[in-house]
Image (tube, helix red, strand yellow):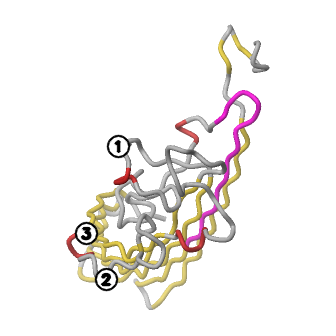
Amino acid sequence: DTLGRYLITGIPFAQFVKMDVDYRLYIPIRKKNRAVYRTMIGVGKPLRNLNVLPYEQSYFSGGPNSVRAWRARTLGPGGYDPTNTNSKYDKIGDLIIEGNIEYRFHMFRSFYGAWFVDAGNIWLLHKDATKPGGEFEITRFYKEIAVGMGWGLRWDLNFFVLRLDAAAPIVDPKYAEGDRWTFDKKPLKQITLNFGIGYPF
């Protein structure tokens, strides 16, 4: 068309590249206990036909299989603080970095527990005036890593696992740099409950 986009039946189609790396390590400890480590990095870039990734291909953080101290699509991007705007949109980005450590242990019968620490965030590849602080910068991204920790209960029914996790934020990147630790912000009042089926990773 006149904007240089490729069309199919007169409609511009999604054109992008995307790469994800997900590494997991399971270490048995005793008969029914194990330590689990996960690292995930992903990046997507829209090409000629789009300025942004399609919504369903964008990254989000938070939720039962991610950084569990935040609900799904409520974390990030970067150091963006949604309370400073009127935006209620789902938090999505072009790049994601996450890491998880979880110790799973047997309690009794078919019930298991877990202690875990989650860390991560999403970022935009380009500046967006509506999401200040949301873009990825190599000099500061590590300061915008959110951290949460918590405890979970699992009920192993053999054919599937029911899971309930409770987590609180420890480091919240939406606050100003130097004020992101939440110990003085009553983190126990910010506990998030996540229900899931199966293990998070």
Q: CA distance from mark 1 to mark 3?
A: 24 Å
Secondary structure predominantly adopted by residues drawn in magenta: strand
Residue 96 picture quarter: bottom right
Looking at the rendered structure, the secondary structure element under dot 3 is loop
> Within 10 angstroms of label 2, few (less than 14), some, or many (20 or more) residues?
few
Q: CA distance from mark 1 to mark 2?
A: 27 Å
Mark 2 vs mark 3: which is more N-terminal?
2
How many numbered circles are shown? 3
> Which residue: 58% across, 41% down?
57
Mark 1 vs mark 2: which is more N-terminal?
1
Q: Is residue 5 left or right of residue 119?
A: right
Percent x, y of residue 182:
34, 77
Percent x, y of residue 146:
46, 70
Looking at the rendered structure, the secondary structure element under dot 1 is loop
92 in the magenta segment? no
The one of 26 and 61 positioned closer to us in this rendering: 61
Type of amino acid under label 2: Phe
Q: Which residue is mark 2?
A: 183
Q: Is there CB contact under 8 Å for labels 2 and 3?
A: no
Relative to 39, residue 14 above or below: above
Looking at the rendered structure, the secondary structure element under dot 2 is loop
The one of 178 and 155 positioned closer to us in this rendering: 178
42 in the magenta segment? yes
Q: Mark number for residue 191?
A: 3
Q: Which residue is mark 1?
A: 86
Q: Look at the image and tell me in which quarter the N terminus lies.
A: top right
Type of amino acid under label 1: Asn
Q: Is there CB contact under 8 Å for labels 1 and 2?
A: no
Type of amino acid under label 3: Ile
- Residue segment shown in magenta: 38-51
Residue 138 picture quarter: bottom right
> Within 10 angstroms of label 3, few (less than 14), some, or many (20 or more) residues?
some
